[in-house]
Image (cartoon, rainbow, N blue to C red):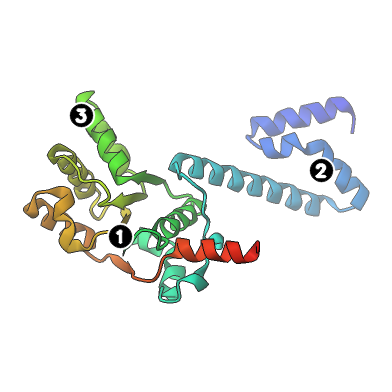
Amino acid sequence: MTIGTLIELQANLKALNLSGIARNLDGHLRQAKESGIDYEEFLLDLTGRELQARAESRLNRRIKESKFPLLKPIETFDLAAVPDLDMRLFRELAGGGYIQERRNIIFLGRSGTGKTHMATALGIEACKQNLRTRFVTCYGLVNELVEARQERTLQRLVQKYVRCDLLIMDELGYIPFSKEGSEFLFQVLAERHEKGSVIITTNLGFADWTRVFGDPAMTAALLDRLTHKAHIINCSWESYRLKQSLKQKVKHA
């Protein structure tokens, strides 16, 4: 193949939005010539590489949009450290069926039991399925909503969070909200009800949520929406974080 033909072919591929193939065309052609594969195999291999490149690019984009503070995929979660966790259910949740069914997940438990790790892992699995995912701390979300109200962009921000396929809200209960902040958070969750899934991690039992939201009636209404058909996982085991730290110390001893 002449240089002119190669340049023209690369331009055609870019025009067809096959940029992954275009970038590596010279190497692909050289490899095909050396291995002596026929045209059909060559095209199959080429299109397969393009699809893989697009899938990787899509996943990277979804993960970047999700704003995870740390990437903790499911493979890094030590299931052996939490023997009381329902493994069958957790693997089922990783499949993402709960998102299609618009069901929620609530992780209840003390600090250090792996709630955030599990929530993040499920969020990454959702990204792999090309689902719009967003990770926020509850306190950070409330601050963002209050600021949006001051800037008169509240409804736009609420709709941004309503449109997510999966919204992960971390650390509910660590810091109480103002009355205004509680109402804005209620608005987001109320509008998401049966439109998209929510994962919440919290160190508080349901009876103590009034301490965070203040208004008993609003708290009851919120719990009614969140717990409807929800998967509630009680993380009552010993500190996952402590077990991981001890394991690392033993490994390096």
Q: For the residue labelled by badge 1, is the local secondary structure a helix, a strand or a loop?
A: loop
Q: Which mark is residue 28?
A: 2
Quick check: marks 1 and 3 in contact, CB under 8 Å? no
Percent from the top left, x then y, of residue 53? 65, 45
Front label number (1 vs 3): 3
Front-most of residues 145 and 46: 145
Neighbourhood count class around disc 2 (C-alpha, 10 Å): few under 14, some 14–19, many 20 upward: some
Neighbourhood count class around disc 1 (C-alpha, 10 Å): few under 14, some 14–19, many 20 upward: many
Residue drawn at x 25%, y 35% as measured from the top left: 145
The kind of residue tagged 2 is His
Percent from the top left, x then y, of residue 157? 28, 34
Does residue 151 lie above or below 21 as drawn?
above
Does residue 182 lie above or below 216 as drawn?
above
**50 relative position to 76: left or right:** right
Q: Sequence order check: which comes first, mark 1 or mark 3?
A: 1
Q: CA distance from mark 2 to mark 3?
A: 54 Å
Q: CA distance from mark 1 to mark 3?
A: 27 Å
Front-most of residues 178 and 233: 178
Residue 77, visible in the rendered structure: no
Percent from the top left, x then y, of residue 215? 8, 49
Residue drawn at x 13%, y 54% as measured from the top left: 210
Q: Sequence order check: which comes first, mark 2 or mark 1?
A: 2
Q: Which residue is mark 1?
A: 104
Does residue 133 lie above or below 73 as drawn?
above
Q: Which residue is mark 3?
A: 149
The N terminus lies in which quarter of the figure?
top right
